[in-house]
Each structure stands twice: as C-alpha cells, then as structure tokens.
Amino acid sequence: MVSKTEETQLNRLENQVDNGGGGAWDYLCLVRKLKVRRSEKVFKYGLSILNDPKKRSALGPEEWTLYEQVAIAAMDCQCLDVTKDCIKVLQKKFPESKRVGRLNGMLLEAKGSWAEAEKAYSSLLEDNSLDQVIHKRRVAMAKAQGNISKAIELLNKYLEIFMADHDAWRELADIYVSLQMYKQAAFCYEELILSQPTVPLYHLAYADVLYTLGGLENLQTAKKYYASTIDLTGGKNTRALFGICLCTSAIAQVSKGRNKEDKESPELQSLAATALEKDYKQRAADKLGLLTSALRSLKI
C-alpha cells in the first residue's frame, strides 16, 4: 500500500517530468518500486528513453527491466505492437527466460487468445509449479472470461500452496461476497485476521460479513469486531461506529423475549452514537439532522 508521503513524492516527480523538468528515469523507477499503475505515463516516458540509443545505453543492465516495464504498460494502453517489439528484444537477449515467457502469455491474454495463453501458462508451470505470478495470471484470465467458478477453484488450489498470500485471500473473499457466499467469505477474513491481526480493514470486512449473515451469535461477534476496528483506528472509523449502532439495534430485535443475560449493556452503542454525532458536527454539520433521525430510528 502506498503511503501519503510516497504518493506525494510520485505526483511531484510526475508533474516535474510532465513540465519538461527531467527525471523521467527516476519517475519510472519510483513507479516500479511502489508497484503502482501509471501505464500511460510509463508508456510515454519509457518509450522515449528506449527510442534514444544514448539514453538507453546509459541504463546498463536496467535497460532490460525498462523493456519489461514498457511492454506491460503498452498492453494496458492497447499498443500491442509495441509490446510485441519489446518482447522480441527480450527474447533475443534471454532466449530461455521464463520471465519473458510470462510476458508472452500476457500478450496472448491482451489479444484475447485465451486458449493459447492457457497453453503457454500450463507449459511454464510444468517447468516451475511454484511460479506465483503465473498462477495469479490464470485466475485473472478466468475472471476476464467471466468464469468465476474456475477463478474460485484456481484460487483455492493456489492458497493450498501459498497460504500466507494475503492478497489472494482478499481476492477470494471479494469474489465470495460478490456471489453472496458469506460463510465462505467469513472464513477468508478469519485467515487474514489470524495472519495480520492489527490490520483494521480485515476486522471491518469480517464484521460486515457477519452482520450480513445475521443471527444472534453472528451479530454479537460482528459487534466485537466493529469494536476492535474502532480500537485499531483510534476511534476514527465512521463505518465501524455505524456498525456498532446497527448491531445493537439488530441484537435487541433478535433478543426480544429472551433472558436478561442475552441482552447487552447500552454503554458501547451510546459511546458510538456520541462519537458519530461529534464527527458529523466537525465534518458534515449539514447532515447532522439525518444522522440524528437515523439513530432515532434504531432506537439509540
């Protein structure tokens, strides 16, 4: 994830290059380091360096990295002829490279030649079954074709091998949520919380899923995870504050007629409602009436 400082640095450097102040190579290096997608700029400035023999030769071994970077950016910009030219140069320099083989598979994807791309990726996996990039490309390809069931199958197989890949767990959770398979999504978020317990995003997403599932036990657990989100964010997560209020209201409805032991103390929801009102007064005073009305409808 890119920090605000890094994003500011990147934008400043981009403006400098755009205005003819130089620093194109530094900009391209920073884009690569931060793993951000600025394809049009990368394509424009990267190609200008590659087309200048003097600038290109000054890069040394980094020249080949730039060819790869421009090839990927050109695919994003639908300039497939440029991608093809870059791959030809790389194939000539590294004739047996699996990395170049991956680029060729991506080019086939960009052309919509799904069967050929699948064949290319399968061949590369035969040589190295632990190539994470190729496994992920196959998932992306299945999604691009609208074959969500295959994407789920491939992701599950991938996670059997690479269980610590947080991005893959998040991707699988997102797919399950989009299909309203909330129990499976909850499992994914449980895995993420176990591996990264201090990331508030996972606590929040898990709470959302449990709240959607409903039922007294799920609602009580959701409330706890909304509370942990608030704790991890220093009380500044508006969604989690709303979540506390919604869970409290839902639990009250479900608990009607039950023993007093099943009912919860109103202290937490009162604090959440107060924090919401304070936040709205500071940032959206004109919406305070709507908030008050909403909280009143929840009987808070």
Image (cartoon, helix red, strand yellow):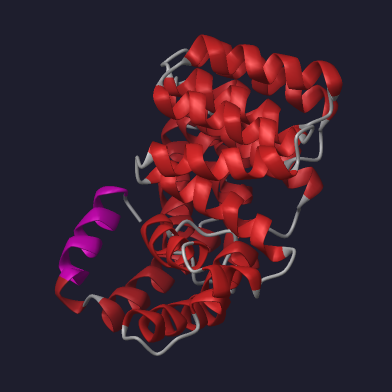
Q: Does residue 153 lie above or below 77 as drawn?
A: above
Count the labels in the image. 0
**Residue 290 magenta-drawn?**
yes
Examine the residues drawn in magenta and state their main secondary structure.
helix
From the viewer's side, name the closer residue of 186 and 151. 151
Spot occupied by residue 272 in the image (x, y as percentages of width and height) = 46, 65
From the viewer's side, name the closer residue of 298 and 174. 174
Q: Quadrant of the N terminus?
A: bottom right
In terms of image quadrants, where is residue 259?
Answer: top right
From the viewer's side, name the closer residue of 171 and 189. 171
**Residue 89 magenta-drawn?**
no
In the image, taking residue 300 as reference, residue 190 lies left or right, namely right
Q: Residue at x 58, y 35 (%)?
A: 171
Residue interval drawn in magenta:
287-298
Q: Residue at x 76, y 54 (%)?
A: 197
Q: Does residue 282 lie above or below 225 as drawn?
A: below
In the image, taking residue 141 as reference, residue 133 lies left or right, namely right
Q: Residue furthest front?
A: 53
Q: Does residue 13 lie above or below 255 as drawn?
A: below
Q: Does residue 179 lie above or below 68 as drawn?
A: above
In terms of image quadrants, where is residue 117?
Answer: top right
Q: Is residue 213 visible?
A: no
Q: Residue at x 72, y 69 (%)?
A: 60
Q: Residue at x 69, y 26 (%)?
A: 135
Q: Quadrant of the C terminus?
A: bottom left
Spot occupied by residue 44 in the image (x, y as percentages of width and height) = 38, 62
